């Protein structure tokens, strides 16, 4: 059984963009009105729902589930994947890269020392937000890795909402 978390400001089953901006816009995301901790928890929730979706749908579509044979298709993607991509694409660039930083902490690529340098390396590695979003959406265990990364920050008494705090650049 998976955990169910609905972060502050989010209601399960509703469009997070509409919860923040009733018009369904993305201004609140771009302006940094959402805390990184809330965003991470919403991404974790969506990833858990995406996993549950595939646990149900994969056996219906593929007789050898959980194995998928070469050439077999996983289309259409889980509905949560589109929602996840929509949320991530609405974020300021720095928020996207901070999520990757937390994922890398979850992967234990590095420790919590010199996070500012690691952050700059991540920005250089991906080069653009679209590549970074594709990376995040493509991770099968995104929720788990974010959970682990958040735990490492907490263990070292680093407030995720103050992580590398500086004004976020809004994407146009």
Image (tube, rainbow, N blue to C red):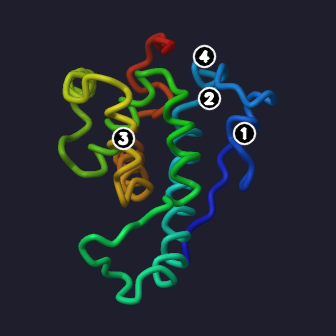
Q: Nearer the viewer, mark 4 or mark 1?
A: 4
Closer to the observer: label 1 or label 3? Answer: 3
Whether pointer 1 and pointer 3 mark residues with C-beta atoms closer than 8 Å, the reply is no
CA–CA distance in space, label 3 to label 4 = 22 Å
> Residue at 44% across / 18% down in the picture?
165
Circle 4 residue: 31
- Mark 2 vs 1: CB contact within 8 A: yes
Mark 1 or mark 3, earlier in chain: 1
Q: Helix or strand or loop: what does disc 1 sit on? A: loop
Q: Is residue 42 above or below residue 49?
A: above
Query: Residue 109: image x %, image y %?
Result: 18, 45
- Name the residue that disc number 2 marks: 34
Which residue lies at the image location 36% right of the left edge and 82% below the top edge? 66
Residue bearing the label numbered 1: 9
Q: Which mark is residue 134?
A: 3
- Pick whichever, 120 or 85, lies toward us: 85
The spot of residue 143 in percent (x, y) is 44, 55
- Against 115, residue 56 (above or below) is below
Q: Which numbered disc, 3 or 2, marks the residue that appears first in the sequence?
A: 2
Tag 2: Cα neighbours inside 10 Å, few (<14), some, or many (≥20)? some
Residue drawn at point x = 60 percent, y = 25 percent: 29
Query: Nearer the observer, disc 3 or disc 2?
Result: 3
Cα distance between the residues tagged 1 and 3: 25 Å
Direction front: furthest residue: 71
Give residue 133's quadrant in the image: top left
Q: Tag 3, which secondary structure?
A: helix
At 50% from the left and 35% from the top, the residue drawn is 88
Secondary element at tag 4: loop
């Amino acid at each position: 059984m998976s955990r169910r978390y609905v972060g502050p400001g989010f209601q399960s089953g509703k469009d997070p963009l509409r919860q923040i901006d009733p018009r369904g816009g993305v201004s609140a995301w771009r302006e940094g009105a959402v805390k990184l901790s809330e965003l991470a928890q919403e991404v974790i929730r969506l990833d858990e729902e995406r996993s549950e979706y595939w646990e149900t749908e994969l056996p219906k579509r593929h007789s050898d589930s959980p194995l998928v044979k070469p050439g077999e298709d996983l289309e259409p993607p889980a509905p949560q994947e589109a929602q996840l991509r929509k949320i991530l694409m609405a974020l300021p660039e720095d928020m996207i890269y901070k999520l990757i930083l937390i994922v890398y902490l979850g992967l234990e690529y590095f420790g919590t020392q010199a996070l500012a340098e690691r952050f700059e390396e991540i920005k250089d590695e991906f080069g653009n937000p679209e590549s970074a979003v594709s990376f995040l959406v493509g991770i099968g265990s995104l929720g788990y890795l974010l959970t682990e990364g958040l735990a490492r920050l907490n263990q070292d008494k680093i407030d995720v909402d103050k992580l590398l705090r500086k004004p976020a650049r809004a994407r146009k």
